[in-house]
Image (spheres, coloured by chain):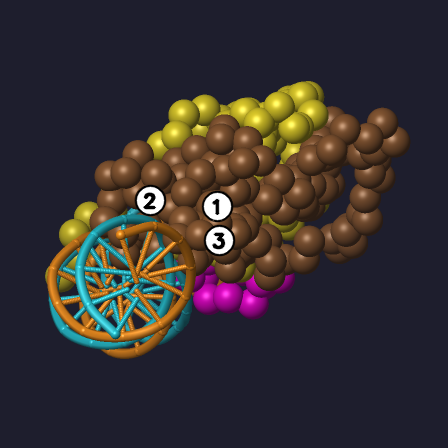
Chain colours: A yellow, B brown, C orange, D cyan
Amino acid sequence: MELDESIVALKALAQDTRLVLFRLLVQAGPEGLPVGELAARLRVPDSTLSAHLRVLRAAGLVRDQRRGRVIQCHADYARMDALLAYLTENCCAGSGACAPVPVCKTLPSPGAQAHATLPRARQRR
Amino acid sequence: MELDESIVALKALAQDTRLVLFRLLVQAGPEGLPVGELAARLRVPDSTLSAHLRVLRAAGLVRDQRRGRVIQCHADYARMDALLAYLTENCCAGSGACAPVPVCKTLPSPGAQAHATLPRARQRR
DNA sequence: TCCATATTTCTAGTTTTATGGAACTATTGG
DNA sequence: CCAATAGTTCCATAAAACTAGAAATATGGA
């Protein structure tokens, strides 16, 4: 991972709601959780949650897939590993003081890598 | 490290200038670098650099000591380790998908090893 | 087709962050 | 004490982020 991507990922995690959200997804395992379930657990309005999810998706930390009406989200472990590796290599190991990069063996995610994002919203008004 | 502290540390690193700045300090080793040297290398005005340093200090990632007129800054490796440990434990290992926590030590001590197990979060439903 | 459910996008208001000039503080040396 | 150097704080401005209601889109089922 490069500097720019790392910044985006760090920004994505550097916010209370999003860090808790991401943690929830990580703990939920490869199956992940539906958007609605996340909103309920975090007690945040749908639109707010959606905004946060967008940030995490843009950072590559969360992916999802539509299952009927429900969109199931899951953490991208490999991406998180890449971030940790970047930090360990560039902001820790550079000094020679740190242990080797932690290599995470990613569990194959169920299903896919596709974003279940809507095609494109029509202009309203 | 707790959630709040992690957020502060993540916010501190989630900015181009500050991440590069911190990386510089890490690479500079325990000696660190003077504030003026940092400003020169990053090509930012003194006041801007000072503001960034303040954020990194507040996050506990950078410390400094005055040597005459010069203030010498250095990275706090232990703090960075704590952040990486938090992320690994809470946002990675919770899934059982990741390797042990990387333990960085400022001084070489053979006894250290990673926390292998983690508090598993409540399963849903 | 029409309706209910799930989620996103739009929009606006509020807050936070980043930036840099100018003034201020601290330290050293003459 | 004075001047020079190293940093910080103060302040204003501009940009970005957070939040959430309302409207729009997507899907499945009766």
**Marked residue chain, label 2:** B
Q: Evaluate whether residue B94 shows in this view.
A: yes
Residue farthest toward the right in the current orientation of the protein: B111
The answer to which of A40 and C20 lies nearer the viewer is C20
User: Are the numbered discs 3 and 1 placed on the same chain, yes or no?
Assistant: yes
- Graded by Cα atoms within 10 Å as few (under 14), some (14 to 19) or many (20 or more), the crowding at tag 1 reads many
Label ID, residue B66:
3
Q: Evaluate whether residue B12 shows in this view.
A: no
The residue beneath circle 1 is: B73
Q: Nearer the viewer, mark 2 or mark 3?
A: 3
Residue at 88 percent across and 31 percent down: it is: B111
Q: Amino acid at mark 1?
A: Cys
Residue at 52 percent across and 52 percent down: it is: B65
Q: Are marks 2 and 3 in contact (CB under 8 Å)?
A: no
**Secondary structure of residue under mark 2:** helix
Q: Considering the image in quadrants, where does the C terminus of chain A appear?
A: bottom left
Q: Amino acid at mark 3?
A: Arg
Magenta residues, start to end: A36-50
Magenta stretch secondary structure, dominant? helix
- Graded by Cα atoms within 10 Å as few (under 14), some (14 to 19) or many (20 or more), the crowding at tag 3 reads few
* Labels 3 and 1: the sequence-earlier one: 3
Instruction: Give the distance between the C-alpha atoms of the residues marked 2 and 3, in whole angstroms.
Output: 12 Å
Query: Residue C14's x, y, as percent?
Result: 31, 78
Query: Residue B91's x, y, as percent?
Result: 64, 42
